[in-house]
């Protein structure tokens, strides 16, 4: 297992970098561990776990292939909930179980970057908090992204921005939204954002 930069790979979108930096900033307020300056996140790894396929799990491991473990890892959860286990520096340390739901963001920094961790269990949506189950998509009340108004057109983020970039102008169809909703009830996706 290695995390190497891929020649000609797409640059990590600024929105993902900003999200990871903001999450790390918030985490830093709650602890004295970890990096203090903004981290130049430049890589994301997406793991996809199928609910009905038990082999799609992440066994206990340490992130020991990166060159600098003092840098944080920010992970974003989408889809079905999962049980994340965070242990210690030894396999003998009893892990703490953490329920990660769709939309959860977790930051591993400081000592925890060297801890054993894994995701052995994926839960179906019916076992999760009902607030995580998206309501039926209704055409009249749809709100897709914060950058879009109710008519589905982009509006300014701030007074100095006159046009919308980074794909924000794309408005998914209701058919696409229904597909994504159905898909994310049967899988769990985890995006780990890091600097390599």
Image (tube, rainbow, N blue to C red):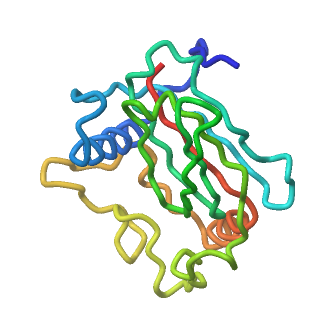
Q: Residue at x 71, y 47 (%)?
A: 48
Is 88 situated above or below 180?
above
Q: Residue furthest left?
A: 159
Residue 24 pos. (x, y %) = 32, 41
Residue plotted at (41% across, 43% down):
107
Q: Who is closer to the viewer here, 10 or 190?
A: 190
Q: Residue at x 66, y 64 (%)?
A: 80
Residue 150, horizontal then vertical, whole percent: 38, 77
Q: Quadrant of residue 14?
A: top left
In the image, taking residue 123 as reference, residue 38 lies left or right, namely: left
Towards the viewer: 40 or 85: 85
- Location of the N terminus by quadrant is top right
Q: Quadrant of residue 169?
A: bottom left
Q: Nearer the viewer, residue 74 or 174?
A: 74
Residue for point 57% across, 26% down? 63
Q: Is residue 74 left or right of residue 189?
A: left
With respect to residue 68, does 183 lie above or below? below
Depth order, front residue of 37/154: 37
Would you place residue 98 above or below residue 57 in this image? Answer: below
Q: How many marks?
A: 0
Q: Position of residue 154 (x, y in %)?
A: 35, 61
Percent position of residue 76, x then y: 50, 49
């Amino acid at each position: 297992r290695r995390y190497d930069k891929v020649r000609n790979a797409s640059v990590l979108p600024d929105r993902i970098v900003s999200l990871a930096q903001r999450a790390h900033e918030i985490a830093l307020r709650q602890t004295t561990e970890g990096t203090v300056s903004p981290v130049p996140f430049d890589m994301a790894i997406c793991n996809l776990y199928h609910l009905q396929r038990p082999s799609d799990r992440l066994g206990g491991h340490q992130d020991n292939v990166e060159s600098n473990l003092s840098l944080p890892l920010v992970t974003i959860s989408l889809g079905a909930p999962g049980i994340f286990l965070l242990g210690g520096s030894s396999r003998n340390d009893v892990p703490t179980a953490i329920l990660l739901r769709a939309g959860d963001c977790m930051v591993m920094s400081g000592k925890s970057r060297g801890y054993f961790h894994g995701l052995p269990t994926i839960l179906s949506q019916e076992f999760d908090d009902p607030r995580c189950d998206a309501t039926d998509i209704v055409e009249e009340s749809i709100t897709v992204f914060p950058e879009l108004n109710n008519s589905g057109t982009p509006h300014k983020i701030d007074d100095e921005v006159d046009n919308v970039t980074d794909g924000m102008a794309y408005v998914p169809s209701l058919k696409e939204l229904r597909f994504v909703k159905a898909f994310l009830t049967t899988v769990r996706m985890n995006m780990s954002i890091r600097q390599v």
